[in-house]
Amino acid sequence: MTDVKRIAVIAGDGIGPEVVAEAIKVMKRTEELFNYKFEFEFGLFGGIAIDETGTPLPEATLDMCKRADSVLLGAVGGPKWDNNSKELRPETGLLGIRKALGLFSNIRPAVVFDCLKDASTLKPEVLEGTDLIVVRELTGGIYFGEKFRREGERGQEAVDTCVYNVEEVERIVRQGFEVAQKRRKKLASVDKANVLETSRLWRETVNRIAPEYPDVELEHVLVDNCAMQLLRRPASFDVIVTENMFGDILSDEAAMLTGSIGMLSSASLGEGSFGLYEPVHGSAPDIAGQGIANPIATILSVALMFRLTFGYEDAANAIEAAVKQVLDAGHRTGDIAVDRSQAIGTEQMGNLIVAALSEQVVSA
């Protein structure tokens, strides 16, 4: 009997529903091609949840995610909710769901397709061979530290505290080493140990753990230098492991190596195989409802889900190959098109990838 995988689907705001629809289309085609069985359950999250339920993360949605084998998320947020109080901001829901589901690690691949080198602002020869992964700690650091305001000698002051303990550092660093072991066996640990005490703890912990992974080449890189080297020599990186805020910034920088943030998938993982998968891009309210968003990042997030949570390696490879086939054929959404007048829409891109997926499996 075919094992049924339960997928919690959270389309979210802006272009979220549009790109998620194409990802589900791809998943349904893999059901037919690989004899999988998926059960989809849909829930509210983010701005739309605030409008309809008064909270960005309704209990019903959280319960749905806890029952599932995996979560597919579109995008959240938008200017409509920018002036809300902290408790009623869509981004608060993101922090809450990560904590509640124990998702301490964010995996963000950045791969430059040969046919998209011209879509990047960097020279093609600089991008040659770029294929890296950022492993970002997701539930600690300055985003989760104590925040408050106080009166100082020069008026009001704002304070954001950055806190990490050894256990938090150990578990994300081990995951970085393990990801590197399955790739080119190179790990860059990024910190600011020349200034920050949390980074000094981070580096001490990395150095203590490193002998357990003798096959992985370790490099310590200060975050400002890493930001520079990502633009100077991106192909030299294999796996980057770093803390929450640094990872947030560096992974968005890495996104632009690919030509568009619309190309980047991500996985948020905890202990075990459970994961939440989402595109790196935001809700893009300026183009929502126009049918022009790039669904590739969300579709590649499904490939990550298949690989990391379900162990469906053949299907993951087929999806990635289908995306490459469509791009190699010259098809582009507006964000990666050299000539935007020739760009195709969200649904058409999804249909082309589904057709290419079928060809990949038949020819395998």
Image (cartoon, rainbow, N blue to C red):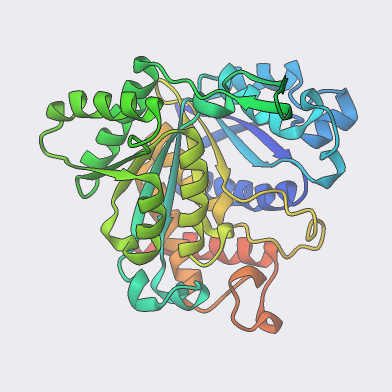
As drawn, is 27 to the left or to the right of 270? right
Question: Which residue is drawn at the image coordinates 59% and 58% (left, top)?
Answer: 262
Report the quarter where the C terminus lies: bottom left
Question: Which residue is drawn at the image coordinates 19% and 45% (left, top)?
Answer: 185
In the figure, residue 60 lies in which quadrant? top right
As drawn, is 16 to the left or to the right of 192? right
Tell me, yes or no, if residue 36 can be seen here. no
As drawn, is 261 to the left or to the right of 285? left
The x and y percentages for residue 305 are 47, 39
Q: 96 above or below 305?
A: above
Tell me, yes or no, if residue 191 can be seen here. yes
**Label total for image:** 0
In the figure, residue 352 lies in which quadrant? bottom right
Nearer-the-camera pick, 227 or 18: 227
Question: Which residue is drawn at the image coordinates 52% and 42% (left, top)?
Answer: 248
The x and y percentages for residue 102 are 51, 19
Question: Which residue is drawn at the image coordinates 75% and 41% (left, top)?
Answer: 77
Nearer-the-camera pick, 347 or 201: 201
Q: 332 above or below 81?
A: below
Q: 126 above or below 30?
A: below
Report the quarter where the N terminus lies: top left
Nearer-the-camera pick, 320 or 161: 161
The x and y percentages for residue 329 are 49, 78
The x and y percentages for residue 71 are 58, 32
